[in-house]
Amino acid sequence: MIKNFRIVKATTPLSLESEMVHWLTHSHTEYELNLYINVKATIFINETGYFINDNDILFIPANVEHSIYLSNKPKNTQYSRIVINFNNNFIKWMSQVLPIWSYIDTLREKSSYKISLKFEDYLYVSDLFNKILENYQLQNSSDMVINFYYLIKYLANSKNHVNHDSKVYEISRYLDENYKEDITLQKLSELFYLNPSYISRLFRKRTGLTIVQYLQFKRILDAHNAITYKGTDIATACYESGFGVFSTFTESTKD
C-alpha cells in the first residue's frame, strides 16, 4: 500500500427530500484534490464560495476549513467525484526524485482554488486521474507517482482558474464582502445594471442556490466561526453576522 496517499472514485446518493444538502464546516490535515463528475454545489473555502459543476476541479489545502452545499435537484441526485488525499510526508517522499514542492506551493498560493478546464484539457486531466486511480488499485507506485506528478504540474501551470469576467462571479464577490448588510435583488439590480428577475434566474442556474440561500449560508458560517473560535454568545453572533431577526438565525441552522 502506498503510504500517505489515497484516491477513490466516490458516488453518494442524495436521497433526502430537501433541495439542498449541507455538509458541515470541517478541515483535515491532508490536501484534497477533487475531479467532479456529477455535481452542482457551492463549496466555501475560508468563507469564499466556489460554484462547482460537472468537470470542475477543486484543490483544498491542508488544515483549511470548508463546507459543502449540494444541490439535490432533481431529487435523488448522484453526487460523483474522484478525490485524491495526500499529506506533506508523501510530498517529501516524492520530492526526493521529482521537483513537486514548487507546484504544490503554486496551487496553495493561487487566488482561486477552483480550476475550470476547456474540453480538450479536461480529457487530458481526467485521463490522468483515472490512470492514478488504476495504478493505485494495482499498487503500481512508480506509474501512479509519475502520473500524479504530471497532474500537479499541469494544474499548477493551468491558466483556467475561474472566469473572473462572469457576472455571477462579480455578484458573488459582492455578496462575500457585504453579506452582513441588508441586500435585496433590487439593490443588486441597481449595482450591476441587470433586471432583478434575470439576476435571480442566472445566479440560481449557475450556483444551484438562490441569493437568499447564499446569504444565509455566508451568515451561518460567520456566526459559527464567531461562536466556535471567538467565544461570542449566540445572540451577538446572530446580529453581527447579518441576521436581523434571531428567529431567522435559529430556523436557518435547523436545516
Image: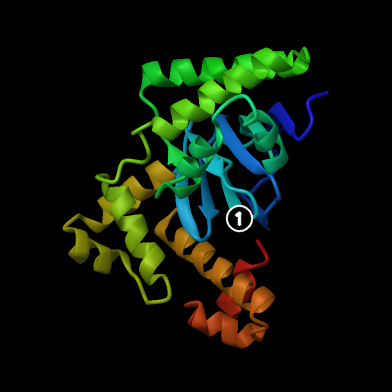
Q: Which amino acid does label 1 sit on?
A: Val
Count of numbered tags: 1
Instruction: Give the side of residue 60 with respect to residue 15, left or right.
Output: left
Residue under the point 37% across and 39% down: 161
> Badge 1: how crowded within 10 Å, few (<14), some, or many (20+)?
some
Residue under the point 53% across and 49% down: 43
Residue located farthest toward the right when viewing the structure as drawn:
1
* Occupied quadrant, residue 131: top right
Q: Where is residue 115 in the image (x, y as percent from the top left)?
A: 43, 36
* Occupied quadrant, residue 79: top right
Residue under the point 61% across and 71% down: 225
Q: Is residue 225 above or below residue 199?
A: below
Display coloring: rainbow
Q: In this view, does 43 lie above or below 221?
A: above
Instruction: Give the side of residue 191 with respect to residue 157, left or right.
Output: left
Residue under the point 49% across and 36% down: 103
Q: Where is residue 186 in the image (x, y as percent from the top left)?
A: 25, 67
Q: Where is residue 45 in the image (x, y as percent from the top left)?
A: 53, 54
Q: Name the residue tied to disc 1.
A: 64
Quadrant (top left, top right, bottom left, bottom right) of the N terminus: top right
Q: In the rendered image, is residue 55 in sight? A: no
Q: In the rendered image, is residue 44 in sight? A: yes
| Residue toward you, 240 or 132 | 132
Secondary structure under the numbered disc 1 in the rendered image: loop
* Occupied quadrant, residue 206: top left
| Residue toward you, 237 or 118 | 118
Instruction: Give the side of residue 24 with respect to residue 196, left or right.
Output: right
